[in-house]
């Protein structure tokens, strides 16, 4: 394997040379937006949806991405090809760029676009076989009217604080509530419950990021004939659910078998959860943008 190439400052640079200025407001203030994207056998899963979310996050914080959505698609595909990757995790970052030490973004003349494509590190297989434990945490989800969870910004402290609480509690993931006590999501994943054969997930306006995996799971569940409802629920509903699972780009679909010490049913990943994971894995190699025209002829730029 040769060098890892990172797209930075309009060029491809080697990993060792991929450094950003300490005056970049992404670093100084978390002023910027990002996306995490998966590539499955050369297919960039739902790239259009990821780029739409990136551009909407940027629009919301008045950050002008210096490329069109089509150009970003090309740059991402080029980064994957240049690194000769088939299955990968892509991180796209657009920061406000270099400015002075004051927080005013108008001192930053040029946004900084970074694309990193890396070999995937999978979650341990046992996590999927046995399911994970989660715990509700004291920190609440950012209120949507204060800092909208729809903005996938470089300011992830809300999520980091709840992850720290989950670590302290000795569980794999946090369950975040909103200021009304309704369930929203995990630190970096959406939550679903299944009750009497119906699949539920919180409406995003309660304070959850509209996950690409969440939407894909809603699609595959409906296509499989399950009723899916986006409706508010509480911790109690989670405790007494038949099945609980989380979704996200990195984690895909993972069963939750224990919530705040309450064992969910028989304490094993649920049947519908397993079906949805399987259905999800059936679509990830075709639903998206193909990086290579043929499996045998990799155009490496
Ligand atoms: N919620 C939060 C807070 C996240 O950071 C993520 C990861 N992007 C998700 C949910 C899941 O979203 P997606 O399925 O698009 O990865």
Image (tube, rainbow, N blue to C red):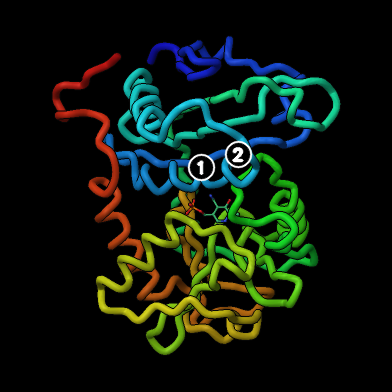
Q: Is residue 126 visible?
A: no
Q: Is residue 290 above or below residue 209?
A: above
Element at label 1: helix
Relative horizontal placement of residue 86, taking residue 177 as reference (left or right): left
Mark 1 packing: few (<14 Cα in 10 Å), some, or many (20+)? many
Give coordinates of residue 55: x percent, y percent.
50, 41
Give coordinates of residue 88: x percent, y percent.
39, 34
Instruction: Return the residue found at the far right.
Output: 102
What residue does disc 2 label?
Answer: 33
Q: Earlier in the sequence, mark 1 or mark 2?
A: 2
Name which quarter of the figure residue 240 lies in: bottom right
Q: Is mark 1 within 8 Å of ligand 1?
A: no
Give coordinates of residue 224: x percent, y percent.
25, 73
Mark 2 packing: few (<14 Cα in 10 Å), some, or many (20+)? many
Q: Nearer the viewer, residue 127 or 238?
A: 238
Dot 1 and dot 2 residues touching (CB under 8 Å): yes
Q: Nearer the viewer, residue 271 or 190?
A: 190
Label 1 and label 2: CA atoms lie apart by 7 Å
């Amino acid at each position: 394997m040769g060098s890892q190439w990172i797209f930075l400052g309009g060029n491809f640079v080697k990993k060792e040379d991929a450094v950003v200025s300490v005056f970049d407001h992404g670093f100084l203030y978390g002023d910027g937006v990002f996306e995490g994207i998966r590539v499955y056998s050369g297919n960039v899963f739902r790239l259009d949806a990821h780029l739409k979310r990136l551009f909407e996050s940027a629009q919301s914080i008045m950050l002008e991405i210096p490329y069109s959505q089509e150009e970003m698609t090309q740059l991402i595909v080029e980064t994957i090809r240049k690194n000769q990757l088939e299955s990968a995790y892509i991180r796209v970052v657009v920061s406000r760029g270099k400015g002075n030490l004051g927080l005013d973004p108008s001192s930053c003349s040029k946004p900084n676009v970074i694309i990193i494509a890396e070999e995937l590190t999978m979650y341990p297989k046992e996590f999927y076989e046995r399911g994970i434990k989660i715990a509700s945490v004291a920190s609440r989800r950012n209120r949507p009217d204060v800092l909208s969870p729809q903005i996938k910004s470089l300011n992830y402290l809300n999520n980091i604080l709840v992850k720290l609480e989950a670590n302290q509690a000795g569980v794999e993931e946090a369950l975040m509530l909103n200021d009304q006590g309704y369930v929203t999501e995990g630190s970096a994943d959406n939550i679903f419950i299944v009750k009497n054969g119906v699949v539920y997930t919180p409406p995003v306006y309660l304070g959850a990021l509209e996950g690409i995996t969440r939407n894909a799971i809603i699609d595959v569940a409906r296509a499989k004939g399950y009723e899916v409802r986006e409706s508010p629920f509480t911790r109690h509903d989670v405790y007494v659910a038949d099945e609980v699972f989380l979704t996200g780009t990195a984690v895909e679909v993972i069963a939750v078998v224990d919530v705040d010490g309450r064992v969910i049913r028989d304490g094993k990943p649920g049947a519908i959860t397993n079906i949805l994971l399987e259905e999800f894995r059936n679509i990830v190699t075709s639903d998206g943008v193909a990086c290579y025209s043929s499996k045998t002829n990799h155009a490496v730029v």
